[in-house]
Image (cartoon, rainbow, N blue to C red):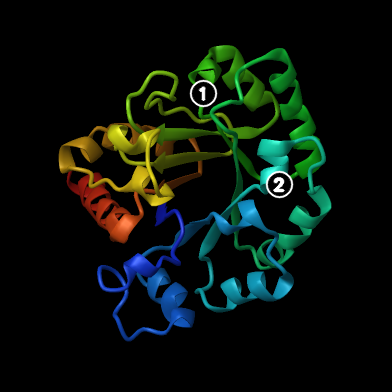
Amino acid sequence: MIRMGTSGFSYDDWVGPVYPRDLPRWRWLPFYASMFDTVELNVTYYRHADRKMASGWVQRSPEGFLFSVKAHGSLTHERSDPEVDAFRESLLPLQENGRLGCVLAQFPQSFHNTPENAGYLPTLRDYLEDLPVVIEFRNVSWMTEDALDLLRRLDFGFCCVDEPRLKGLMPPVARATGPLAYVRFHGRNAAKWWEHENAWERYDYTYSDDELREWVPQLHELDAQVPLTLVYANNHYRGQSVDALKALSRLLTTG
């Protein structure tokens, strides 16, 4: 099964392009859930969701809707004193209601494939115990069979990415190493990837049908390998991610 959604749904610049101008903010998630059956949450990287917040996500979305949540920054970027208990507790409402798709552990570009960093991955598995976890590497040094084998041994999924073809970044490789496959479309805005005034500029990108069509056979292949493939579009500026997924859905059906 392939499920598709966007990386985040709570963007002011979606008012007009995606959300009706008179739609109250509290109704953004229900409106979003009328289009997609999953979403990737970035807010959990910055702060731990309290029970009220996480329960609200559940209540405002339909049965079976899945949330993938980004691991807290203390687990992936700082790593010296990770806030494990607080992060795990923040996920309980999603787990209790069968709404947790997975945890996305996104490591920074500076996280190179070294013995020390590779040794941290088993520690991360111990921290997160039996949670479904997908690892996103942002440094091409991890694109080795040994690294993929390590993910398999730890029952970690591998995050496939579509992003600018810049030196040092991960290539568009489709592999499944865990019980679910995971793909993120970041856009290909090479000019703004490293140099930008605002974070959203990196993800200001409109995919063409030809660019999305490159992924059609790879997504079908992933779908054949694992029970669940999660696909998220992160080119979120002014709802370009919504348009990308609508086009990709059409291409998956028509080729």
- Using the numbered discs, state the Cα–Cα distance from disc 2 to disc 1 in whole angstroms: 24 Å
For residue 131, the mark is 2
For badge 1, the amino acid type reads: Asn
Q: Are marks 2 and 1 in contact (CB under 8 Å)?
A: no
Considering depth in this image, is 215 or 29 the residue closer to the camera? 29
Instruction: For label 2, count other residues whose C-alpha is less than 10 Å away and answer few (under 14), some (14-19) or many (20+).
Output: some
Q: Position of residue 162 (x, y in %)?
A: 36, 34
Q: Locate residue 54, reporting x and y percent.
A: 65, 69
Q: Residues within 10 Å of mark 1 (few under 14, many from 20)?
A: some
Q: Residue at x 74, y 18 (%)?
A: 116
Q: Is residue 232 above or below residue 10?
A: above
Q: Residue at x 42, y 42 (%)?
A: 184
Q: Residue 17 location in percent, x, y?
A: 25, 68
Q: Nearer the viewer, mark 2 or mark 1?
A: 1
Residue 161 in the image: above or below residue 141? below
Image check: 99 left or right of 170? Answer: right
Q: Earlier in the sequence, mark 2 or mark 1?
A: 2
Q: Nearer the viewer, residue 30 or 47?
A: 47
Q: Position of residue 31 (x, y in %)?
A: 38, 76
Is residue 242 visible in the rendered image? The answer is no
Q: Quadrant of residue 89?
A: bottom right
Under circle 1, the secondary element is: loop
The image quarter in which residue 155 lies: top right
Tell me the quadrant of the picture where the C terminus can be found: top left
Q: Amino acid at mark 2?
A: Leu
Tally of numbered tags: 2
Q: Is residue 111 visible?
A: yes
**Residue identified by numbered label 1:** 139
Callout 2 secondary element: loop
Side of 232 where 207 appears, left or right: left
